[in-house]
Image: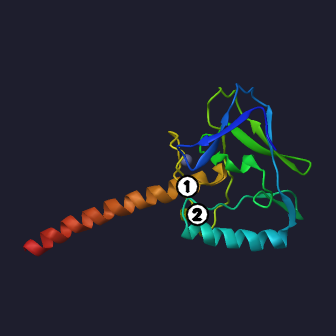
Amino acid sequence: MSSKYIAIKKSAIHGRGVFAKQNIKKGACIIEYLGEKITKAEADIRTKKRMKFSRKNRFLGGVYIFELNKRYDLDGLAVKNNPARLINHSCLPNCEAVNDSGRIWIRALKNIKKGEELKYNYGYEFGDDWKDYPCNCKSKNCIGYILHRKNWNKIRKLKNEKKHRKKDARTKKSSGGAFRRS
Ligand SMILES: [Zn+2]
């Protein structure tokens, strides 16, 4: 599968990325995300396997499984020629993945200039392992982890709590010092 819109090049975010070969208008369907249609049960097995691998080999693996509907998912790693799976995640995306009656398309969220890297939010759910997926998108609003935007407030709260805990620890330390002096 190729598209007149894209070129594959080394990315500053991660590995190889997908770049605009020409100016792309907002709303354009850039490329289809191809894959094998699999049942949820099969998707669970493959997801677990890949997550285990990517935790061990940070920045090497990915899951590449999209939810299609209640019964089926799409495995983007099971087909050979699926350049859309090289599109990186970003907290400030210029594309989105849309499900058009069971087919996944990467669509432009805004006007994209020739040479820009294409990015979309992977939309990961907030699980126990969210810390295993750090984000390297380098955008000014980066939340630090690959997560669906709806989870960002949770992360902000956690980060705030951590900051306060650090502050508390510092106060305790200095009062401890005073205690030792007496
Ligand atoms: Zn980010």
Residue appearing at x 60%, y 54% in the figure: 146
- Alpha-carbon neighbours of circle 1 within 10 Å: few (<14), some, or many (≥20)? many
Q: In the figure, residue 27 lies in which quadrant?
A: top right
Q: Is residue 43 above or below residue 77?
A: below
SS class of the residue under badge 1?
loop
Out of 158 and 119, give the one closest to the viewer. 119
What is the CA distance from the residue labelled 1 to the residue labelled 2? 7 Å
In which quadrant will I find the C terminus?
bottom left
Out of 1 and 63, give the one closest to the viewer. 1
Q: Left or right of 135: which side holds 160?
A: left
* Cβ atoms under marks 1 and 2 closer than 8 Å: yes
- Measured as percent of width and height from the top left, residue 51 is found at 64, 68
Say which amino acid is labelled 1: Tyr
Q: Label 1: which residue?
A: 145
Mark 1: is the Cβ under 8 angstroms from ligand 1?
Answer: yes
Q: Label 2: which residue?
A: 130
SS class of the residue under badge 2?
helix
- Measured as percent of width and height from the top left, residue 13 is found at 54, 46
Out of 128 and 48, give the one closest to the viewer. 48
Q: Left or right of 28: which side holds 146?
A: left
In which quadrant will I find the N terminus?
top right
Q: Left or right of 176: which side holds 182?
A: left
